[in-house]
Image (cartoon, helix red, strand yellow):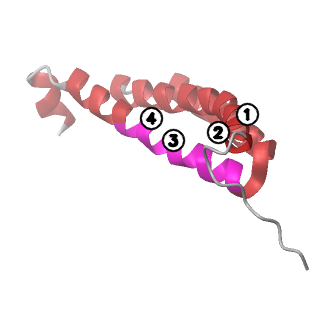
Amino acid sequence: MLEFLAENNCLGLLVGLLTFLIIGLFHPLVIKGEYYFGVKCWWVFLLAGLVCVVLSVLAENQTVSSLLGVVAFSCFWSIKEVFDQRKRVERGWFPKREKNKE
């Protein structure tokens, strides 16, 4: 399929579409991560981002390398967003998780 897209100069459209979907996926990941784990989950985004950077450099296919780069920098951006999400929760824009009182 990648050959067909490359022959018809559509790889840029594929990367654009998948970038849109990746960014859309990270929005709820940040919200759920902060909800269940607080800002302590930032290191998971850092680790995932670093792994994706290494995989992006090692990937032989340019499209795969590009998408791994998008995932890597989406992970890095999510670190900032986790801390911003905490502020949004404090402002009441998102629900705060109630701790078990047992």
Q: Quadrant of residue 91?
A: top right
Q: Amino acid at mark 2?
A: Ala
Which residue matches tag 3? 27
Q: Amino acid at mark 4?
A: Ile
Mark yes or no: residue 60 visible.
no
- Which stretch appears magenta? 21-35
Above or below, 66 against 75 in this view is above
- Where residue 58 appears, as percent x and y from the top left, is 53, 26
Spatial CA distance of label 4 from label 1 is 17 Å
Residues at marks 3 and 2 touching, judged by CB atoms closer than 8 Å: no
Which residue matches tag 1? 83
Residues at marks 1 and 3 touching, judged by CB atoms closer than 8 Å: no
Which residue matches tag 2? 48
Left or right of residue 3: residue 34: right
Q: Secondary structure at mark 4?
A: helix
Q: Amino acid at mark 3?
A: His
Point out the frontmost of discs 3 and 2: 3
Spatial CA distance of label 3 from label 2 is 16 Å
Q: Amino acid at mark 1?
A: Phe
Residue at point 65%, 54% (across, down) = 95
Instruction: Tell me which label, 1 or 3, sits earlier in the chain.
Output: 3
Mark yes or no: residue 65 visible.
yes
Spatial CA distance of label 4 from label 3 is 7 Å
Spatial CA distance of label 2 from label 1 is 17 Å
- Where residue 64 appears, as percent x and y from the top left, is 39, 31
Point out the frontmost of discs 4 and 1: 1
Instruction: Tell me which label, 4 or 1, sits earlier in the chain.
Output: 4
Which residue matches tag 4? 23
